[in-house]
Image: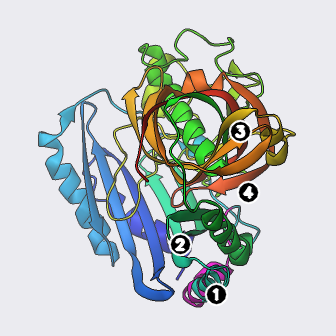
Amino acid sequence: MILGKKCLQDMAEMGLRQADGFEAEIHLENYNYGLTRFSEGQIHQNISMEGIYVTARVFDGRRCSEVTARAPEPEKVAEAVRRAAEALVAGAVRPQRPLPGPDKACSVDENGDIPGFDACVPENADRWRGRVAERAVSVIEREGPRPFGRVATEFSERLIMNTAELISYAPRTSCNVSFTAIRDTGYGYSERSGFSLDAINAGEAASEAAGGCNLSRDPEPFPEGEYPVILLPYAAADLVSFVARLGADGEAVAEGRSFMSGRAGERVVSDLLTIYDDGADEHGCPILFDGEGVRKRRVDIISEGIASGLLYNQTTAAAEGEVSTGHAPVVRAFGSFRGGASVSPQNLFLAEGDAPVAEMIEDTDLGLLITTLHYTRVVEPRDVVITGMTRNGTFLVRNGEIVGPVKNLRFTDSYVRALNQVTHVGSQSLLCGEGVGGIRVPALRLDSLRFTGTTEF
């Protein structure tokens, strides 16, 4: 149930009164998450998690302490602030983070249209997940494979309030499905995401997974080497995400830890590529303000291949004489996991081009079409060198046609180098990822990706 801004604000105000004269910040999230999994055509797991969670931070000019707890009633919010104030003596000494004021706040009109919020999700989430699972199983089994998958819904509302008089509030919703189809040696995959129930076409996604599975049966061995590749959006999203996360952090750029360091205004990837982060764009899953309550700004990270913009939070912006772009990582319910990064691009977009996938295939004499990338990990962060494997359908393209499936390959390559090899950008994009934000990308064709190993499957 959505409680509304006033209810959460009253809880936060009670907490801030316990700050004992220190500067303080309260993050409240009223959170509901539902997950339905199915296997071999049967629903085998339903999970529901809900509750109100508080993260209280207290500052004394030199130290910061933080307490996260479940907050079923206002008194628990006040208790979290008191505990954070008591813990200051053990807090790490670090530069004081500037608390944003009301000029940087973002609060929605609860009586109007709210970006990234579909009122049908709280009302229908449980029934909708069951219907989607039933539809996916029916479509996949009709086409032959065995169906597996997950259907997730989330609705939440966040309020951030601090002693500098900032109040930011917004509710949001998200829906995500991912389907895997298995038949003999064939695997297929599909995924759909959005903030509204209407954004998910379960039948289309299930048919895509089943079709990919049937095409990928009985793969042949293929040697390691350097080949042109066609990356479907699921795979292309991995490249864009790593490049933005490792490259656009303003602090990393200032310290020389990014491939964009010292290269502002220079071409860093193919001029066919424009990458930006926009928390208000409803073609993604909008997040209107960051983990410090600062209203998100659109940042053009790379414009037609040129290094154009960087991401900052309050601390890194102050250190570099910049203004926060609203990209402090968003604290999630059940804890304040932030992955160690100072900023987080959570609403990424790669601008569409004009090439359908069929044209990419036609323009390839010898190469590979890749559905997804799996278990990708950083080898060297500055040049975004990544290793990983292909998965869920890898196909040989010869003389402009798909001629059959091949066994999965391991790759190790710089994503920056790879994105300098782009020859085609797809004309249709897909929103990938679940949870906080997402990434909308089209398919890509690259002249080169380096494969360093083979597999037996």
Left of 343 or right of it: where is 362? right
Q: Amino acid at mark 2?
A: Arg
**First in sequence: mark 3 or mark 4?**
4
The residues bearing labels 1 and 2 have C-alpha atoms spaced at a distance of: 15 Å
**First in sequence: mark 3 or mark 2?**
2
Identify residue for label 3: 444
Q: Is residue 121 magenta?
A: yes
> Which numbered circle lies on residue 282?
4
Left of 204 or right of it: where is 216? left
Q: Amino acid at mark 1?
A: Ser
**First in sequence: mark 1 or mark 3?**
1
Q: Residue at x 74, y 75 (%)?
A: 198
**First in sequence: mark 4 or mark 2?**
2
Q: Nearer the viewer, residue 175 or 99?
A: 175
Q: Is residue 255 magenta?
A: no
Q: Residues within 10 Å of mark 2 (few under 14, many from 20)?
A: some
What secondary structure is the magenta-colored segment mainly? helix
* Residue 425 in view here: yes
Q: Amino acid at mark 3?
A: Leu
Residue 278: image quadrant is top right
Identify residue for label 1: 138
Q: Nearer the viewer, mark 3 or mark 4?
A: 3
Q: Nearer the viewer, mark 1 or mark 2?
A: 2
